[in-house]
Amino acid sequence: MSATSSASLPANGSPTPTAALPRVLAGPILRRVTAEGVMLWLVTSRPQQARVWLLPEQDATPLTRGEDGLPRTPGCRLTEHLAMPLGEHAWLLLIEAHPDTPLPADCAIAYELGLAEPSASSTDTPEWQGIADWAPQIRYPGESLPRFRLPSRLTRVAHGSCRKPHHGLSDDEQQAQQSAEDAATTDRLETPPPKGPGGDGLVALDRWLSERRQSVTEWPEVMLFTGDQIYADDVAGPMLGAIDQLIAGLGLPEETLMEAEVSDTRELRQHPSHLYHRPQLLPDMAANEGVAASFFGAKRKPIFTSTGADNHLIGLSEVIAMYLLVWSDVPWEALGITLEDPLSLEGHDDATRERHATEARHLRRFCGGLGQVRRLLANVPSLMIFDDHDVTDDWNLSAAWEEAAYGHPFSRRIIGNALTGYLLCQAAGNGPEPLAELLEEARALFTHALTGTDKALTDKISADTAQSDHTAKAADGHFDVERQEALIARLHRCESWDYQLDTTPPLIVADTRTRRWRSERKLSHPSGLMDWEALSELQQRLVDHPAVVLVSPAPMFGVKLIESIQKLFTLAGKPLMVDAENWMAHRGAASVMLNIFRHSRTPQNFVILSGDVHYSFAYDVRLKHRRSSPNIWQITSSGIRNRFPVGLLDVLDRLNRWLYAPRSPLNLLTRRRNMRVTPRRHDAASQGERLLNACGIGLIDLDSEGRPAAIRQLTTDGQEVHFVPRR
């Protein structure tokens, strides 16, 4: 069976010739994979029919192919979770292939994805093409198709967070890399980027995996992206220029902006503050507005608090474009996107021009690895959960922040657009079933903007003269305002972002962003990362399992010194200055979370995977004063392409070891006084460091009882760093 997406587009579309664009712009990305179904996410330049074959390599039946190169056997039954236009030359497909019998475990499983444009008439024969035709680059050398492994139980998991495209190097590192950088004479590197400390952890994992294709049992069964897959709030100037080029090239929709200094996103791109001066356009609050006054403590302060908000994403099409540009090399090449645009820098000072050039240099290195990133995402199933930078820095940090942000139409729209992008590009692939109504609303929003075919909505708006301007905008490739606001309102109320896979051991992914335990003492104090109801639901999921892998984007057990510094800033009324959100920052949430570990029916073995902090570490945790304590491992891998300030982390690491040594009385002042937390050393440490400050991605090996047999970090400079238990 095949899945077909076939909505029509207006005749007066973008000038970009569709036939000149590659068939597939991004993907396929392997998402949720079970024995009963394999989910694929991809973006095409034209509407496509799809056929999928799942081919276990233990199957002794010879594979025969037809003249079109596709298998002669019938394809899998397909569920079409999404088939929708994103732009005049961009279509999103999320399809799930269901085999006739459950897929076998512990062997390589190849897949073929056939694509064809819908026939103009019933008498025409579709011209099908397979992966070898439209994306041969996603196959590893010597392999005819992408391949993945479905395990009988979880044995190897890759995980990481925080992938910032323009993350750079320190001065010393920059000098060491300068010769390699100078060799790049085009806007993008044409060869894989050199190894180095400022690289991309996904490229490091692709290199590692490419050396182990003959040993199926060494492949990770899943990649867990634990937050900040994009940085919507911290965008390089050249990247914003690339986003503008992509929006124009693919004909992505415009939108009307409410209570903003610009009327719509088209005017935004022409505004003098569009590049490097967006804080002047972002909403802020006056100090005499009650809650905002106690929150910000100054005459006027921005709602968006990211230190890198100069190019904060605003429009929904900007968010969609960002996802395409960080997951695939194809749009960059197909549209001839450039990183250097002298016209965009007219009127900017020399310091801004130098900053732009530096960011462009970092982005060239990033783009040089995107082909490998695309290959990795096509061969290893991935699951994702948001953290703040997927939306904006300090997202839902406190009740005061929420009241300020959601109380302004413009800031509410910006947050909602980031959530819409997350829904379509991340959350849907984790499990679309609980999000079906939201996905349908998003599909209708884009379809109406690009085709104007929603007659019921058009009639309703036409009858209301007050909305006549919005109707004209929708016909002109703009999102309908009412429909967009309704979707955003539902997204803000959604409580279905967390999810669970019934693997062995179970994999549970927590939402620590949208169901927060607001401080009752002071609205400006950090909220608990999960409220009582959400924590109670989590506990019910844990009951009677002997072991569990639990994803918490923020570490449940962090560095005590850093948490103490955050607490001091909170007491001083400045939680935003140090991103003061951690599990121990809120008494109620911390107490309930710690009690979950004490419950007699919760698992004996907890593996907690986290990111967020821009450094990596591993802790062994036990309960004190208990005959039978659960075994708890806090394993943090961060970031994939981001690091803590070089040098500062070494100082904090050393001070933490001195001030919070196992026998230090300062431990009695923490909420974890009844737990024994033992940091692991890593084998790259020269002076006993526990914290690893290196871009890369984590690899966890689990034994038959769900305990970590090995904890590693693959770094972008080619190291394989082990966190070694204390003997």
Image (spheres, rainbow, N blue to C red):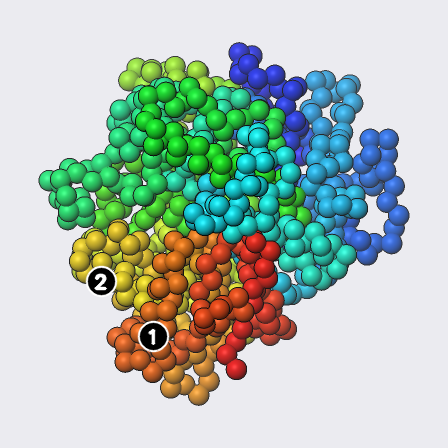
**Which residue type does callout 2 highlight?**
Leu
Task: Report the side of 395 relative to 420 (left or right).
Answer: left
Mark 2, residue position: 568
Camera-side residue: 394 or 483? 394
Residue under the image location 39 percent in, 32 percent down: 354
- Looking at the rendered structure, the number of numbered marks drawn on it comes to 2
Residue under the image location 79 percent in, 46 percent down: 142
Residue under the image location 53 percent in, 45 percent down: 177
Camera-side residue: 320 or 33? 320
| Quadrant hosting residue 535 | bottom left
Disc 1, SS: helix
Q: Earlier in the sequence, mark 2 or mark 1?
A: 2
Q: Disc 2 to disc 1, how far (Cα)?
A: 19 Å
Q: Is residue 724 above or below residue 253?
A: below
Task: Report the side of 369 relative to 494 (left or right).
Answer: right
Q: Is residue 495 above or below residue 540?
A: above
**In this rendering, does residue 242 appear at all?**
yes
Camera-side residue: 281 or 317? 281
Camera-side residue: 239 or 176? 176
Task: Report the side of 247 relative to 111 (left or right).
Answer: left
Q: Which mark is residue 658?
A: 1
Q: Position of residue 393 (x, y in %)?
A: 34, 46
Q: Position of residue 289 (x, y in %)?
A: 13, 40
Residues at discs 2 and 1 in contact (Cβ within 8 Å): no
**Which residue type does callout 1 highlight?**
Trp
Q: Is residue 233 above or below residue 615?
A: above
Q: Position of residue 415 (x, y in %)?
A: 35, 39
